[in-house]
Each structure stands twice: as C-alpha cells, then as structure tokens.
Image (spheres, rainbow, N blue to C red):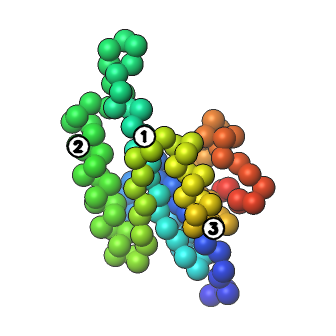
Amino acid sequence: MSNKKTNSLIWFRNNLRIEDNQALYNAVQNSSKVIGYINIDPNNLIETEHGFRKMEKYRAKFLLESVENLKNNLNKLNISLIVDFQTLEKSLKYVIDKYRFNLFICKKNGQEMKKMKKEKYQII
C-alpha cells in the first residue's frame, strides 16, 4: 500500500449503493481519509410555476430512507457521510473548503462540474 496523504470527498448523487461503486473503491484505495457527501436541495421541494414539485412526499421519504441506509453502510467502512440540505452551490463549496479536501470524486456531470471546477481540486 502506498503512503496516502489525500483527503477525498465522494459526492453521492443518484447512485447510493456502495457494493458496486467504482468511485468509492478508487477513493478508498487512493486516500488516507474518505468522507461521503450528499446534498438534498430544498429547491426540489418548492412548487414550480406549473404547480408541481420536483420531489413530492413519497419520493422524499424514499430518499431519506435510502440516505439512512447509505450512512449505515458507509459507517461499516469507517466512512462518515455529510448530509446537507442547502442549495448545492453554497453547500458543496463550503464542505470542500471546510474539510480541505484535495480530491473530489463524483460521477461527472458537465453543468455541475463547470460550476465547481477549481485548480486546487482534482476532480475525477
């Protein structure tokens, strides 16, 4: 095993499984510390101009149960999970800066990565 000094933040978005999660595997293999992160944006619970919400109560309940299951599974691997309920733009930057992560891992999504890409973070 190599001398690891990398602190990694793995962003869980849609795939909340750990068994077949290649990004999680890579983070554990290449980092001295790994912390999970998930954001539940409160804007998804607000009615749109068409009178609908992106997330209704049953989907929200399912999501919270899934996040609790993810948290329990990560705890078995000695990995903490940060669950945040702020807008993504505020939340993610604050968490990365607060914990001084130097490796940020998530499944790439062009729009979100353009907002978050900075020279001091290695985004894979």
| Residue 61, numbered label | 2
Which residue was labeled with disc 3?
100
Mark 1 to mark 2: distance in Å? 14 Å
| Alpha carbon distance from label 3 to label 2 | 32 Å
Task: Give, as a three-letter code, the residue at label 1.
Answer: Asp
* Identity, as a three-letter code, of the amino acid under mark 3: Arg
Question: Mark 1 or mark 2: which comes first in sequence?
Answer: 1
Mark 1 near mark 2, Cβ–Cβ under 8 Å? Answer: no
Position of residue 46 relative to residue 75, above or below, is above
Q: Position of residue 33 (x, y in %)?
A: 55, 76
Q: Residues within 10 Å of mark 2 (few under 14, many from 20)?
A: few
Task: Farthest residue to the right: give it.
Answer: 119
**Which residue is depicted at the point 24% across and 52% down?**
65
Q: Secondary structure at mark 3?
A: loop
Q: Is residue 98 visible?
A: yes
The quadrant holding residue 27 is bottom right
Disc 1: CA contacts within 10 A as few (<14), some (14-19) or many (>=20): some
Left or right of 41? Residue 109 is right
Q: Secondary structure at mark 1?
A: loop
Identify residue type, mark 2.
Lys
Residue drawn at (32%, 54%), measured in percent from left and top? 67
Cα separation between marks 3 and 1: 23 Å
Q: Name the one closer to the observer, 25 or 109.
A: 109
Give the number of the mark in front: 1 or 2: 1
- Per the rendering, the mark at residue 41 is 1
x and y percentages locating residue 107 in the rendered image: 56, 50
40 shown above or below 8? above
Q: Earlier in the sequence, mark 3 or mark 1?
A: 1
